[in-house]
Image: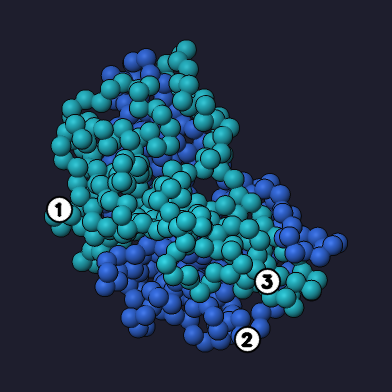
Chain colours: A blue, B cyan
Amino acid sequence: MTEHEPASQRTTMKRGTNRAVYSPDEIRAVLQAGMIAHVGVTTEDGPIVLPMAYGLRGDQILVHGSVANAMLRGGRGIDVCITVTIVDGLVVARSPLHNSMNYRSVVIRGLASPITDPADQADALKVINDHLALIWDTARAPSESDYKQTLVLSVPLAEASAKIRDGDPIDDDDDIAGPCWAGVLPLTSTWGNPIDSADLRDGIQPPTAVNTLSGSDAHG
Amino acid sequence: MTEHEPASQRTTMKRGTNRAVYSPDEIRAVLQAGMIAHVGVTTEDGPIVLPMAYGLRGDQILVHGSVANAMLRGGRGIDVCITVTIVDGLVVARSPLHNSMNYRSVVIRGLASPITDPADQADALKVINDHLALIWDTARAPSESDYKQTLVLSVPLAEASAKIRDGDPIDDDDDIAGPCWAGVLPLTSTWGNPIDSADLRDGIQPPTAVNTLSGSDAHG
């Protein structure tokens, strides 16, 4: 990571446990491990932040959802902030105000553009769909009318930065000599066993892509 | 939930699996089960969304972090949107564009005010600290100078709404008769075993509050 040192260090950083990351590879790794994006836009009624599914394609992040329609009501190209956060653990310090969380987070600021070309939109939706699980090709192919209800936005990753905190709490020397415990309680998100839909016909098994995820680390 | 039906239904709602929730009790339950908030504000450079720790006190949500300082640079009282999302599972439909996620989400819009009274700030920080784990009282008490580095914001829950999706995918009848699998892959977040800090002195054990969390559902 030494090749991509941040230009300026935040005041909370010390002992290397809490740092901003500007390496495109590390930013991409966080985005690949993340599950949902929180997308913020400015409206006439103030800021709004909504959770959305996302995917990565080339140097763009793609988001979609019916909410995208409302967000884009103002026209083509709007200023957005897309934030993806993974919580990795609770950091317990000897002084309560030094408690923290271990996390990986990426903040992307940029101009969101709607993807309107039909073939491009179909590809973008497949990318978003397959971000969590490769289940697109195990379902029936979408029809033309399916696509019309969905809006996909594309935002360049050019203005992305990551912040990663890992490792131990940072206590003052006086506190380290004291009687209190300090450490980390790790957090793991795991996919469970597939649950058949109530309307599933007899004898149909989950696809391999679903069975493969089952039991695995969701941020792995 | 019948006592608190939403005033208007979103277009995506059908068959009762996807609904907006306006009951204060249900909104509070989602916020109590959540872990981090994504806080959005409007800046001169466009919207920004940052992950922050939070807690609940009376009819207010409290957030804190060094980033709060930058967010409040414009003065007292700023328009914010605070969104808390818990992902509960991957919803696999027979048609890929009907794939979805099961989730619980709360969106709060309102005016954020800094908490400046020292006793009030101390209480607010304890509330935020204890949101995930009751570890405040097992550490040394904070000093006066500890408090000076932290800014806490308070936002009323008056303009809060929740959206909860659970249950099966919603497929078209033609697809239900087809050969594809449909169902849910549940997601569970679990606290692991406590890891001692590298600088922990010999013989100090984790407090009961930490041991109690270990192995439990983080959104339980």
Label 1: few (<14), some or many (≥20) within 10 Å? few
- Name the residue beneath numbered marker 3: B171
Question: Which residue position is annotated with label 1?
Answer: B76
Q: Nearer the viewer, mark 1 or mark 3?
A: 3
Q: Amino acid at mark 2?
A: Glu
Q: CA distance from mark 2 to mark 3?
A: 16 Å
Front residue of A156/A49: it is A49
Residue lying at the far front of the rendered structure: B3
Could you tell me how far apart the alpha carbons at marks 1 and 2 are, in whole angstroms?
A: 50 Å
Residue at position x 69%, y 75% from top? B172
Label 3 sits on what residue type? Asp
Indicate the secondary structure of the residue bearing disc 2: helix
Give the crowd class for mark 3: few <14, some 14-19, many >=20 residues within 10 Å.
some
Q: Are marks 1 and 2 in contact (CB under 8 Å)?
A: no
Residue B93, image x, y percentages? 67, 67
One can see residue B140 in this view: yes
Labelled pair 1, 3 in contact (Cβ < 8 Å): no
Check the residue under mark 1 and report the chain it is in: B
